[in-house]
């Protein structure tokens, strides 16, 4: 295990986080996540307490995770939940449990703040490891999911049963 702390991101971290996300996503097919994060921080849905970084012993940032508010739109109501995006780890530190530790800590804080569920779009084989299920299993469909069977749109209940009775649509990236 890497010696590190996981803490709230500060404005002074933004430029280092930008480089970190860029370096990390250069290893994947997703593009533009680094600019996307700058946009998220300006939105009223941004939650500073749920933008976390992992810092190693040398004070270097080796991971980041952001959860921010999103909505389930149901016929006569909308429900506020969370969206996880992005998460990234420095490539030199892949497969050492950093993503898992950041997810655990972010979910602990989110639950403490009263949030009930987390959504995301991503790679099923990775996110199933953390308990994510396709959102269609809860009757919640991504607006682009015409066949209502997308495996890439996923949800996780922070509290068991939190998504019961919240069937609707979700519009996330
Ligand atoms: C995906 C990413 C965040 C994983 O970070 P990590 O710190 O290496 O992950 P961890 O070491 O905590 O691994 C957690 C689990 O996921 C598995 N895992 C790690 N990377 C994986 C991948 N790319 N695909 C599938 N499973 C993966 C690990 O084996 C581990 O499983 P286990 O607990 O059953 O052994 C990292 O590879 C990354 O930053 N990639 C580039 C950015 C990206 O694609 N982000 C996700 C999309 S938003």
Image (spheres, grey):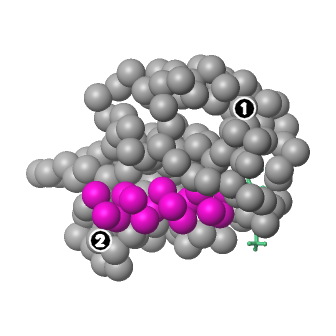
- Cα gap from disc 2 to disc 1, whole angstroms: 34 Å
Q: Residue furthest left?
A: 76
Residue stretch in magenta? 99-113
Residue 137 picture quarter: bottom left
Q: Which residue is mark 1?
A: 20
Instruction: Say which residue appears at 62% left-offset and 20% top-offset.
Output: 15
Q: Which residue is mark 2?
A: 162
Instruction: Say which residue appears at 74% left-offset and 48% top-offset.
Output: 57
Q: Above or below — where is 118 with respect to 83?
A: below
Tell me if residue 48 is in the magenta stretch.
no
Question: Crowdedness of circle 2 by 10 Å Cα count: few (<14), some, many (20+)?
Answer: some
Check disc 2 and report its element: helix, strand or loop.
Answer: loop
**Which dot marks residue 121?**
none
Pointers 2 and 1 in contact (CB under 8 A)? no
User: Between 145 and 73, which is closer to the camera in this rendering?
Assistant: 73
Q: Is residue 109 visible?
A: yes
Instruction: Say which residue appears at 43% left-offset and 26% top-offset.
Output: 41
Check disc 1 and report its element: helix, strand or loop.
Answer: helix
Residue 140: % across, % down? 37, 59
């Amino acid at each position: 295990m890497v010696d590190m702390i996981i803490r709230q991101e500060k404005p002074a971290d933004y430029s280092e986080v930008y480089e970190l996300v860029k370096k990390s996503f250069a290893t994947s097919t997703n593009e533009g996540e680094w600019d996307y994060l700058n946009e998220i921080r300006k939105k009223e849905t941004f939650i500073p307490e749920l933008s976390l970084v992992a810092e190693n012993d040398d004070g270097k940032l080796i991971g980041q995770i952001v959860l921010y508010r999103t909505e389930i739109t149901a016929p006569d109501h909308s429900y506020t939940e969370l969206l996880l995006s992005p998460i990234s780890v420095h490539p030199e530190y892949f497969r050492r449990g950093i993503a898992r530790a950041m997810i655990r800590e972010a979910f602990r804080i989110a639950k403490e703040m009263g949030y009930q569920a987390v959504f995301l779009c991503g790679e099923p084989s990775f996110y199933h490891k953390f308990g994510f299920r396709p959102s269609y299993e809860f009757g919640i469909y991504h607006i682009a999911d015409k066949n209502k069977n997308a495996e890439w749109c996923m949800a996780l209940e922070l509290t068991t049963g939190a998504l019961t009775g919240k069937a609707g649509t979700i519009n996330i990236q």
